[in-house]
Image (cartoon, coloured by chain):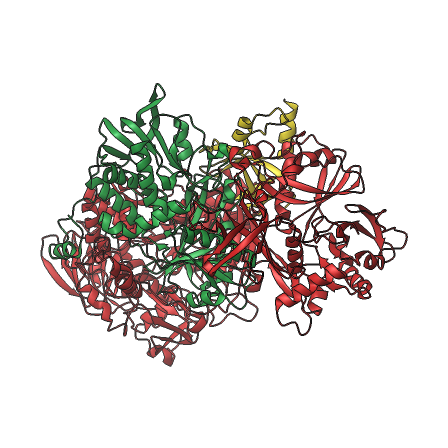
Chain colours: A yellow, B green, C red
Amino acid sequence: MRIRCPYCGARDNGEFSYLGDAAPRRPEGMAAEPAQMFDYVYLRDNPAGAIRELWYHAAGCRSWLVVTRDTRTHAIAGVAAARDVALAREAGR
Amino acid sequence: MRYSLLSVLGQALRGQRDWTPQWRDAAPKPEYDVVVVGGGGHGLATAYYLAKEHGITNVAVLERSHVGSGNVGRNTTIIRSNYGLAGNIPFYERSLKLWEGLEQDINYNAMVSQRGVLNLYHSDAQRDAYARRGNAMRIAGADAELLDREGVRALVPVIDFDNARFPVKGGLLQRRGGTVRHDAVAWGYARAADGRGVDVIQNCEVTGIRRENGRVTGVETSRGFVGARKVALSVAGSSSRLAAMAGLRLPIESHVLQAFVSEGVKPLIDGVMTFGAGHFYVSQSDKGGLVFGGDIDGYNSYAQRGNLATIEDVMEGGMALWPGLGRLRLLRHWGGIMDMSMDGSPIIDRTGIEGLYLNAGWCYGGFKATPAAGFCFAHLIARDAPHPDAAAYRLDRFATGHLIDEKGMGAQPNLH
Amino acid sequence: MSTTTLTRLEGAGPAAAPPSALRLQPFRTVSGGLIDRCSPLPFSFDGRRYMGVQGDTLASALLANGVRLVGRSFKYHRPRGLLAAGSEEPNALVELRGGARREPNTRATVAELYAGLEAASQNRWPSLALDALGVNGLVAPVLAAGFYYKTFMWPAALWERLYEPMIRRVAGLGRAAGADDPDAYEKVHAHCDVLVVGGGPAGLSAALAAGRAGARVILVDEDFVLGGRLNAERREIDGSPAAEWLSATLAELRSLPEVRLLARTTLFGVYDHGAYGAVEREGDHLAVPPEHAPRQRLWRIAARQAVLAAGALERPHVFGGNDRPGIMLAGAVRTYLNRFGVLPGHSVAVLTSGDDGWRTVDDVAAAGGRVAAVIDTRAEAPPELRRRAEALGARVIAGGHVAGTRGRLALASVDVAGAGGRTERIACDCLAMANGWNPLVHLDSHLSARPVWSEAIHAFVPGPGHGHGPDAGMRAAGAAAGRLTLAECLETGGRAGAEAASACGFAAVAPAVPTTDPEGVAHVPLWRAPRSRGKAFVDFQNDVAASDIELAHREGFRAVELLKRYTTLGMATDQGKTSNLSGLGIMAELTGRTIPGVGTTMFRPPYTPVAIGAFAGHHRGRDFRPTRQVASHAWCVENGAVFVEAGLWRRPAYVPRPGEGDWMVSVSREVETVRARVGLCDMTTLGKIDIQGPDAAAFLDRVCANAIGTLPVGRCGYAVLLREDGLMMDDGTVARLGESRFVITVSSAHAAKVMQHLEFCRQWLWPGLDVRMASVSEQWAQYALAGPRARDTLRGIVDPDFDLADAALPVLGCAAVTVGGGIPARLFRLSFSGELAYEIAVPAGYGDAAWRALMAAGAAHGICAYGAEALSVMRIEKGYPAGAEINGQTTAGDLGLGALLAADKDYVGRLMKDRPGLADPDRPVLAGFHPVDRGARLRAGAHFFGLCATPSLAADEGSMTSVAYSPTLGHWIGLGLIRRGSARHGERVRAYDPVRGGDVVVEICPPAFVDPNGEKLHA
């Protein structure tokens, strides 16, 4: 597998480590409910198909990335810097 | 026909003409007491024990492909009960005991072979962790021995004791662990379940789970609706997809785990051995191939194949432990899709939807669990109460914090 | 056409009078082929000495010497000879080389001959000709597919004691070396625009098209000679022998700077996104690889486009006795004739189901062999071909099949059933089988693409879905694409190469397609002979016969995967290359379905077996993983330190002094020195993360469970990090160097994980926080200086302007200082031992000097270096949790840290830590333990039970996590986790350790054993 890091170019997947689905949002703040946090920490859609997921370029630039990938074929549709995605998400809040 | 040396000899004289299908290629009936989804080892064992232990024979096993087409035929065939936590040990010990009598029970030689499972340690801290685990096993009535370096050398003189980056200091040995001919487990249970009246229905894909008034009434399939009072999911690798048909989200991710086999050679090692300083474990099949594996590839996948980085990592571990492997050749590698759960342990439980039962989350440990998973799942389905040996495998344990996390890796499935 | 028209490509000029060695090779032709008859190579097989020539494989050399019998089959131990001439060979497996270099299961067809080659047959006893287990053949009716699933069950105990050991001994194939592999391997990364798999006419055309356009091209071929079947057939291109086109094409490719041709290189696997694995056999054609050269090299190739031009494999016929030595694939017969100058037999019969097999007739005759017969299984033999064969004296039988064969250890005759039902016996010592070709779709299916059935060539070809889109564009060409004729190979290869280069942005055009001599491809496959006598083998190596497929059908194993697993069809070292389709064909016949209706089997990597050593490369022995050395490593080595592996780190465990015979003596002396005077310990392994920015304090308050933001500048604090699931991730220290600058140190083992977690929090959870971080673990050497004389020692290296008095630098103070005359350093008043202690960090480059300076400065105060063992003893004496307690299963509360957790802020892990299972007061919590009998030894891993309890899981109260012999107290002490432990101080329990025969009564106590009130710390 090769992942196109926006900063480093296409690299072998051995350089990256994986966290998982990027969809769950951490419930922030003191008002967050345990049930919401449980959902964030433990429950996954685990789709057979397209998923946006978090990878970390551990042996490279140490960027977290949001990779859009098909779990049936491994085909990658896009890669973005996670911080950019997160900032856009914050802006859209 | 009962299987025995006599029947085989008799058929040899008759050109093997009288054998019949080992299980009927059944067509779905309109309704069953229990529909088990998934014709793998666990599903077939569940159906078998439903019939044998609970007298429930109006049972169908629905398999989207053919019997044993999933992980029961893709694993590295190891059985063991060397777990360290109270939630796990009695369950896996029951499994090992069921393995020990399996062949006579189902009249099928699955080649259960207790040639020992040896986990190597390379540091004092690892030794103490294995001691903690081995003691727990002994306390629960399982067998465990803590070996020092010389004890390991006596068992596996072939490995590197002299030039290793992480020298072997000893190992935790479970002599009753070993290997089983994996496909034969599925076939044997299919034949035995069929013999007790269970319908094993192949090429029948479940596409929906029908519910009325909050209770399950049956499943939609590629071969039409099949009614059922109880539906039992036993579809490791696809658990999330099936659960989603009933509106459930699970604490599970699907990951690919690769396995490897070498060309066959004359006997080199007897039992199963795991490297404690890298991702590598190995045994040798009766046919002579070294069967080995390592860690999961580490990303969500339904593709049943892995990548080169993981393959190299496994082989590096192999060569570090056992430099004599260099000239042996890798014959084939493949991937299976694991239900990786959030604490590394499985789920055998009701689902909150009446009549829907779940057996899932086996990570890479499902094969060894096959008999006990079937046994305990059947108990749960028949009696609507968990079997004591599987009582810890609750679906709500993630919410309540009663985790069974052997490795202490937390809610990150790819680390278990 | 005669053999002399085949131009020699390599080696010496035209053969003159045959050298004497050739006279010893009765089946060697006088001329022709890609061999050098003037370079004889002696070799041995089963101890007998033979002579081959340069350019031979072991297989061709054996055949040249008239050696037909080369192996025994797996189950029935039937005598077997060569079936093929390439890597698909199922029969001719030998043990190549000897001693530590012995390579079992080596296909003689791909083993290049070298002078002194030694090979032995395998899986036979006492000899190849007289194999005792040949008796298995007599009981073959019992040993049908899957018989073992039905037997060996009674009595149960005998399976493991008798049956299985017996089976294991007779199973297996060759013998592994049984010694460490003495050769080296290496790995290389390569990138290219167009990867071409296969160096035959299609692959070379593709490489030419892409290479001419300027694309970076890598062409790989498993063979040691490029050209593919051009080397095996007598063909013409543009009116000249094909060899001329071949040498001109190779010359042009070699002249293109961006084209790399790799012979002896097998593309074994296709992985996601254009990643490919190949193995180059750099030294396998030599007796021993040259010094400093690898035996094999693993290529990891990242290619933007790929052309699959791997060719096709010929299919055997299935009939009774089809495995007798001398029965070969027709294409292999032609390869031996045309490439190796070897006549596979004096009298050759041809069994074919298509026009293609007839080509063998001319080739045999041209080489001086006799064609005994041509049996065409089709009702009509092509008249023109028939006339030519008959002119050569061959008997031609159309609409016939082979109904049986004879000969003890080699073929003597075949019984041919004619169309009219009459059977005639034809004497021959070689039968050439042609039953169509299977395109090599293997690599295409590695990415899970399913091949599709082609009615045109009666074989599976790559399906439309192959390659998986732009990430891994792979296109097939030539025979691999089912375009079997030479003309099609040249045309589709050139086109595929041009398309691949164009897809990479090059202006590429397909080369002009040369003309070729005509060839017939009409073909009607016959999956098995309608009636024949004896076992009709489908999978030769695994001894799977047509009758086994019938049995599988009878027992319900009809799905292709079930068929395969039940009969072991296609599971041998050739992975079904010559057998899968016959198996499918027979199952289709039995079930009345079409072949694609029965299914296809997925081909898994590797394409051919690959040495495990090649995958591992140099990652073995001490180079398995890198070694990280601490800053004081050189000093430690000079002073005889004993090291311990801690992850990748090699840490000094203790530094023995002369006369200290036992590790415990040394460790205790180190502890006593620290507690009485002063000691120096290397803490460089700690993870150090520099965190800066206006929001640094706010950030740390979110990632740490305790209050951090209120830490004053110039102070250190304890940091508790939780995972989001509420359990302990790690603990560490935070030092506030400035208003917006912190350094956090975390445990060595968790350094990478914590860094990754903090970056996750920064980049993904809270991107709005203005904070940046860098790992500075490598940049700073860090030492702990501990003991009553620590300050005095420190004074010796810290520059005099800095006040080290307790008031200026109190417990948990930190300061930037300079040492040794202006070298910047950081000083932290932190203690892991409970003593007056400092951690001092200096730039890594000064690490060695600073260590030596501290040792020198401390000499007057009685300093000693102490290692990881003494460090651990002292932290246990103080009751500080470490890796054995922070094991991923414990909460902060379990470790007595609950009171530190902040109640008034959100932080990672806040909510999940309160789940009932984690907040349960009955959970095992940290406590101290000492043996009631002070002479008793404690061991970590022991479980706790009440004194009257019978050990059981239900009665289990927890376990000992860390133990040490405390020289301070003079007895063993331990830390452990026990139910409600903090409320049970003074209670006695058993520490039960059956795996080591231990059972010790211990008393529960507070975890701090030494100086519980911390008085020494504040000295």
Residue C945 is situated, as x and y percent measured from the top left of the image, at 48, 50
Q: Which residue is drawn at 71% across and 69% down?
A: C638
The picture places residue C113, in percent across and down from the top left corner, at 41, 70
Which residue is located at x 24 percent, y 65 percent? C78
Position of C812 relative to A39 (above/below): below
Query: Residue sitting at 83 percent across and 58 percent down?
Result: C792
Q: Nearer the viewer, residue C945 or C854?
A: C945
In this rendering, would C980 be left or right of B54? right
Please identify the quadrant where the N terminus of chain C is shown.
bottom left
Q: Nearer the viewer, residue C407 or C791?
A: C791
Is the residue C659 above or below the residue B219 in the image? below
Q: Is residue C753 left or right of residue B326?
A: right
Q: State the residue in front, C787 or C393.
A: C787
Q: Can residue C766 be seen in this view?
A: yes
Q: Which residue lies furthest to the bottom in this view?
A: C20
Query: Left or right: where does residue A63 sit relative to residue C835?
Result: left
- The residue at the point 56 percent across, 43 percent down is C890
In percent of width and height, residue B282 lies at: 42, 57
Q: Image quadrant of residue C118?
A: bottom left
Residue extending farthest to the top is B213
Check the image and report above or below for C403 versus C665.
Answer: above
Q: How many numbered marks appear?
A: 0
Place of residue C51 in the rendered image (x, y in percent of width and height, measured from the top left) = 37, 76
Question: Residue C904: which quarter of the image?
Answer: top right
* Depth order, front residue of B240/B259: B240
Q: Does residue C309 appear anywhere in the picture?
A: no
